[in-house]
Each structure stands twice: as C-alpha cells, then as structure tokens.
Amino acid sequence: MAKKSPQKTTGPKPRYSREKIVELAVDLADAQGIEAVSLRAVASSLGTGPASLYRYVKSYDQLTELMVDRISAEYDFDACTGSAIEQLVNIAHQGRGIMRRHPWVPLIVLQKQVMTHNSMAYLERGLLALADTELSAAVKLHTIAMLNSLTAAFALNDQKQDEQQEASAVNEALQTGAYPQLLRTLSELKQPLDRDDAFEQGIRTYLHGIGVGVGKY
C-alpha cells in the first residue's frame, strides 16, 4: 500500500508585520518625539502587549535602527548628478529635508552608528560620488560620515531657532560692549543670514576643504 505523503503544516499567520510596527513607531516619533517611542507604546497603539512584538523586534535599540532604516529609504539617489561636490550637496539637502520631516532623526544620527540596508545604501551612494576623486579610502569614508553629521547638526540647530532668545535680549547683550567683533560683523551684514544658503555654503566649504577632487591624502 502506498504511503500517503505527509501533509504540509504551517504555523499561525503572523498577526502583525515588522514593517507595520516600524511605521507606527516612526509616526509616533514624528508626532511626539523619540522619547515617546517604546515597544510598550507601539504595542499599545496596536491594542496588544509588548511581549507580542518580540517576534518581530527584539529590542528598543533594534526598533530605532529599523526606524532610521525606514526614513533612509526616502532618499532619491537618482536625483544626484554632476560633479562629486554637486552630488554630495544634493544628498545633504535631501538629508536635511528628511530630518525636518522626522525631527527625532538628528539626535540618533549624532549619537549612534546605524548600519542597515538603507543606511548602507546612503554610504554606497556617497562613495560612488567620490569614486573618481583622488581621495584615499579612509578619507572617503570620513567625508561621508562627516557629511551626515554636519547635516544632522544643522537640522538640529534648525529646530532650536524657535527656542532662541528674543532679538531684544540679544541686542541688549551686544550693546554692553562685551562682544565687539560680533557686533561689528553683524552690523556689516547687508541682509539677514539665510539658513538655506548658510547650510549649502557650509557643506560646500567642508567638501572643498577636505580636498574632494583635489589631491590624495
């Protein structure tokens, strides 16, 4: 008598997905800040307990890494054309835009190194921009890392603008005579500093200073 082939059995269909969990965490961070994000908080938004999420996300650290990976997918690398500097400036502008949409990102970028699929794609694209330069391998890696850090620092400073002292308080301090060079420099400005221009100029100055396309380190 022919033996019956064993029937294939499958486990229960996953109730959630890692993508859904990460998306909820990103939405929560966008709305309330990274401090509001925890496995418990995300689980609560799903109407369940944190233990049910461990099948998909092992820890809070992994969750934040996946969140960074998720927002890193927002880069449009096809838009990066031109010289090495032009490509990297484009990447920096995109990064600043992403960090404006997700204000919790700059602190994470400055505090920890995240190596996930999409963050590695960022590194890969930056290195591609530098592929035809004379920079050494070490300086290429340093350049991309610093580009990301400078973008994050500037984006973080963007957030602080609403928290600055009133102009009257600054003017009073300037008139004390304690800051003569600052007073002189500000008085010589023909128009207020534009933050977008300041950002691009800062990125370009760094890239030129590091020697992109100039010589080998």
Image: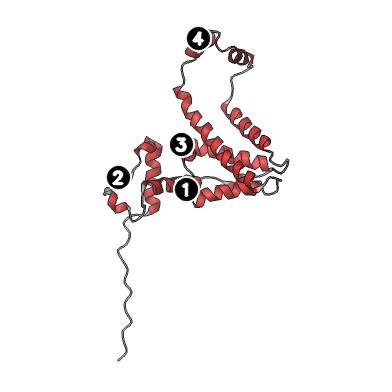
Q: Which residue is drawn at 65% across and 34% down?
A: 204
Mark 2 residue crowding within 10 angstroms, few (<14) / some (14–19) / many (20+): some
Disc 1 packing (10 Å; few <14; some 14–19; many ≥20): many
* Depth order, front residue of 20/106: 106
Amino acid at dot 3: Leu
The number of discs equals 4
Q: Label for residue 116? A: none
**Residue at mark 3 to residue at mark 1: CA–CA distance:** 15 Å
The answer to which of 217 and 185 lies nearer the viewer is 217
Residue type marked 2: Arg
Between the residue at mark 1 and the residue at mark 4, the CA separation in whole angstroms equals 45 Å
Kind of residue at disc 4: Glu
Q: Residue type at mark 1?
A: Asp
| Residue hosting label 2 | 40
Sequence-first tag of 1 and 4: 1
Report crowding for label 4: few under 14, some 14 to 19, many 20 or more residues within 10 A (C-alpha).
Answer: few
> Could you say where residue 168 lies in the image, as x and y percent from the top left?
48, 12
Q: Residue 69 carries which label?
A: 1
Earlier residue among tags 2 and 1: 2
Query: Badge 3 is on which residue?
Result: 107
